[in-house]
Amino acid sequence: MRKSTNILLAALLVSSAVSAQNKINIVSNEGSTTSYNTSEVSSVAINGNTVTVAPQNTSFTASRISFTKIAAGAVQIQESAGWLESAYITWAPLEGASSYNVYVKGGSYTEYTKLDDQLVRNYGTYGRADALGLKAGVYSLKVVPVINNAEDETKASEATSLTVSNYNREGFAHFNRTVGVGAYNNDGSLKEGAIVLYVTKNNAKTVTATLANGTFTGLQAIINAYQKKNVTQPPLDIRVIGLLKAEDMDAFGSSSEGIQIKGAAKDSPLNITIEGVGNDATIHGFGFLIRNAASIEMRNLGIMRQMDDGISLDTDNKNIWIHNVDVFYGKQGGGDHAKGDGGIDVKADSKFVTIDNCHFWDTGKSSMCGMKSETGPNYITYHHNWFDHSDSRHPRVRTMSVHLYNNYYDGVAKYGAGAAASSDVFVEKNYFRDTKYPMTIASQAHDIKDDGSSVLSGEDGGIIKAYDNVIKDLPAKGGFTPYSQNNTDFDAYVATTRDEKVPATVTAKKGGHAYNNFDTDPSLMYSYTPDNANDVPEKVTGFLGAGRINHGDFKFTFNNAVDDESAEINTKLSSAIDNYKSTLVGIFGDPDAQSGETGEQTDTTSTSGQTGGETGGDTGGTTISSSIECTFNGSVSNPAFTFVGSYGDSETTINGVNLTKGAKINSKGSITFTTDKEMTITVIVGSNKANNVSIDGTKHDCDTATHTYTGTLPAGTHKLAKDKASEYIVMYIGLK
């Protein structure tokens, strides 16, 4: 965002003929979008990250601004934004359209260029397209409907000024490496000659690729071909669409983990990227084993109920980059396997690894880093990860030299970073909120439990160097002891400057290990620019933060009062993971690529750490053509209305019926419906929240006595969402 400017909307109108439906879209740091008709806005003032819209005089913090141009009767764009080396657009179904083509312009694309058909998907109540492999820059996306087997440009709509940023490539995975990790170049574009595979539940067994050593069918078979005889193959980009379950696969290279990516010999350069398309690419029922491989990237994926580890870097790997992955519960077992085994584990001489911007959802054992067999030293980076109410191993380090910076420890029940077995850990500018033991060294200080046993299994200690971290809301049963307070039983040596070397006299109580000061050796360290520690929570949870784009389609809200200090399995979260379903209907350009399993995703709230919370997810989609009524008394009474979110307590009487719960319209709640003609809408809201509604991005005040708004809506798809100032509860909607 520019420091200070003022945009005059008159200059943005493309033509008077379409100006009434031109929109300015303002995207918050959290990723939500507020849209205004440009005809209703006189100016947009920008001061830093603060945006003020006039004459509405609405101000809020924003990350970017884009524009949509919609002609009368054309495709109605719902949302658009640039993200990290990608951009996306969603739109409402257009009557008469059998399909859509989507075009991208900007960066290397000087003219509108058609996206691959597989990137243009059908979600029933909306369409979505994602443009991948984009260099940083400003882009436009155009949606052209296909009517009677031909494109109709007169009904096309476009979104412009979409700002695309590069992924952060700081970390050991890219250290001293001039070429990109995986199938992409460092500028975000695909490497020359790269093969792109689109994988869905329908074709994981039948997808084919022709390589130097033959033609191979099935996803695992194709990956296996990169191992055979160590034949140099072209870079491979595997793009996962929708939900992919274990039963959809052709085979598994590892019976205990799932998909195996393996080189013929240690550190074999494979140049493979596995990435998700959009915000809903999800692996369910298996994980990934990476062995003897170099140049592997995994990004923008959700992993649920994996057999063992979500991602296991097992034996002799190099230049591995794992980022923007959502890690959920694995296969439930007994004891400390109640939440599954490892989230992302780094083992057995895996080196030059970066794990960043991953979101760990209440994982029990988030990341083991090192065994005891490494010949090392092996260098690993963790940065900008969101350890979201997870329990332990953030990471648990053995033998490795590890740099942890700008991670968000958010309600950690056991411990944050643990150093054992002669490891060296530099913990820099992280934010620890309500973390029991932010840092701990094996066999000393807070690693020793009340009964004399060790959290880190009584192993020899490593050494932690800490610098400029924020420790907030330290639990009463937790603790942190710096070396300056106790030079024998300490949790970390706290440096006064980033470049301070830890003295050789600072040693682990058990084993006598001294810190190797790798972080102050320019021959061993990469260049990086850390964020201020106090800015980490906002950065990690923001639009360009941890997890999949827009933080993925799976929504869950933890109850800090309970979940911060509970390491027990959250049964509400567990059930939501088990019952996760894809909302993908199919690919517009491939009528046979159907999901076969659809369901509306919900925003779920944990109220006890075990049970509780109201869920939304009631689905609809019927076009409304006559008078209709709908109440939201803990459920949606009419299937023509789609509600996503949770219910809130309120009370009102409508048509003699007492209603006690309504649809909570907050940052994660919305109601959508479609009318085929102009209609009058009546909305009644609960009296215990804001006395207004926001429809299609415009705020409307309700009658103060009756809590009712009445207005007119044109034909099309409409959305009730949160106004920037306040949330509200919808009890009733009537249309006539």
Image: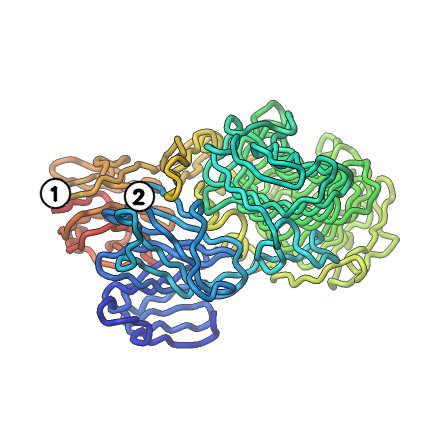
Q: Is residue 448 visible?
A: no
**Circle 2: residue type:** Thr
Task: Report the residue at 81% width, 50% height from top.
Answer: 487
Up the image or down, 75 lies above or below 199; here it is below
Q: Earlier in the sequence, mark 2 or mark 1?
A: 2
Give the x, y percent position of residue 475.
59, 44
Q: Residues within 10 Å of mark 2 (few under 14, many from 20)?
A: some
Q: Which residue is tagged 1? A: 626
C-alpha gap between disc 2 and disc 1: 19 Å
The one nearer the camera, 485 or 148, is: 148
How many numbered marks appear?
2
Up the image or down, 613 lies above or below 300; here it is above
- In the image, is 240 to the left or to the right of 289? left
Task: Report the residue at 55% width, 28% height from top.
Answer: 250
Question: Which colour scheme appears in the figure?
Answer: rainbow
- In the image, is 542 to the left or to the right of 36? right
Give the x, y percent position of residue 380.
72, 48
Q: Residues within 10 Å of mark 1 (few under 14, many from 20)?
A: few
Q: Residue furthest top?
A: 334
Give the x, y percent position of residue 448.
74, 36
Q: Secondary structure at mark 1?
A: loop
**Circle 1: residue type:** Ser
Tag shown at residue 236: none
The one nearer the camera, 414 or 265, is: 265
